[in-house]
Image (cartoon, helix red, strand yellow):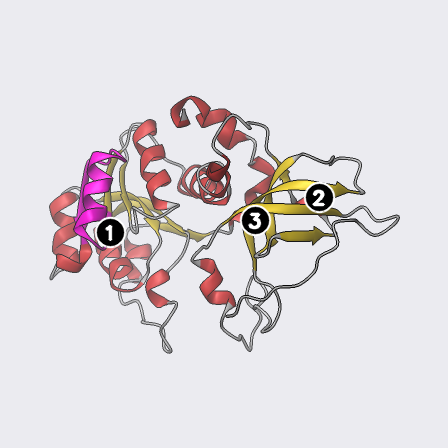
Amino acid sequence: MEVVSGTASLAVPPGSAAVVVKNLYLSCDPYMRGRMTEHETPSYVPDFVPGEVLVNHGVSKVVASGHPDFKVGDLVWGITGWEEYTLNPKPESLFKINHPEMPLSYYIGVLGMPGLTAYAGFFNVAKPKKGDYVFVSAASGAVGQIVGQLAKLTGCYVVGSAGSDEKVNLLKTKFGVDYAFNYKKEQDLNAALKRYFPEGIDIYFENVGGAMLDAVLLNMRVHGRIAVCGMISQYNLEQPEGVHNLFCLVSKRVRMEGFLVGDHYGEYRKVPQGGEDQIR
């Protein structure tokens, strides 16, 4: 990776429906790690091309527009370049910011892609009910911390795992989960989960994979639900770890479903409207 300087035109091509935006905030998200690997079989999102500008979610301000739905001065969030200015030829993919009174940085967090990921994965995939026992791995991350709070607002019992005592303390004192533990200090993940879930887990929001997933499968309740958001423990491995307890899906009639946030962008407006009071 290198930082380069260049000259950018701040005008859209004549007759174009493109926009030029000034980027105000840029997000660095775990899924980008996968785009840095060359895949023989195409992944769900294209690999980054060496020498080209990195792209990811950001918050931007329109400085030039040929599109009837966007005017100069509009604040937007969506995919943009890791650069000061970006020419976007398909601005239909951008979302207008309708709550400019909120801190703009929220739109690469709770009001942006991480918030929508948490909302869609928890409500559309996991389908919670009041009183459910919920476990969230990587619970202090951008998505996990929101899932835990949504679960508490739904009336669930919530436990989160994280990789440091500082993050565990954050989960308990700021994000309001019932219990949290440092998985790096646990010699036996199965025993740890039984300690916090003596009656089993109804919903597992999966962010890490590997040994944690294996332990969770042993502790799922009958008709439990696993929403698979990511498996970050596997991203840097040359040979991904296997999972040994998959028969629990059969014996406990567990539904395990992966999802991509891009499939749920149509529901974006529900996130700020439904949680605006809690966010404030």
Say which of 86 and 138 sits in front: 86
Q: Earlier in the sequence, mark 3 or mark 2?
A: 2
Residue drawn at 57 percent across, 68 percent down: 48
Q: Nearer the viewer, residue 6 or 230?
A: 6
Q: Residue 76: percent from the left, percent from the top?
A: 62, 39
Split into 4 quadrants, where in the image is the C terminus? top left
Give coordinates of residue 2: x percent, y percent. Answer: 52, 69
User: Do the numbered discs 3 and 2 sit on residues whose CB atoms are within 8 Å?
Assistant: no
Q: Which tag, 2 or 1, sits closer to the chain's start? A: 2
Q: Nearer the viewer, residue 201 or 240?
A: 240
* Residue at image coords 66%, 53%: 86
Helix, strand or loop status at disc 2: helix
Label 2 packing within 10 angstroms: few (<14), some (14-19), many (20+)? some
Determine which of the numbered discs, if any, sits on residue 11 in the image: none
Label 2 amino acid?
A: Glu
The amino acid sitting under disc 1 is Ala
Residue mark closest to the camera, 3 vs 2: 2
Q: Which residue is mark 3?
A: 262
> Could you say which disc has been placed on residue 92 in the image?
2
CA distance for labels 2 and 1: 37 Å
Classify mark 1: residues with Cα within 10 Å, few (<14), some (14-19) or many (20+): many
Disc 3: CA contacts within 10 A as few (<14), some (14-19) or many (>=20): few
The residue wearing badge 1 is 162
Marks 3 and 2, Cα distance to the nearest angstrom? 14 Å
169 falls in the magenta region: yes
Place residue 118 in its image quadrant. top left
Mark 1, secondary structure of its residue:
strand
Identify the secondary structure beneath mark 3. helix
Stretch in magenta: 161-182
Where residue 40 appears, as percent x and y from the top left, is 55, 78
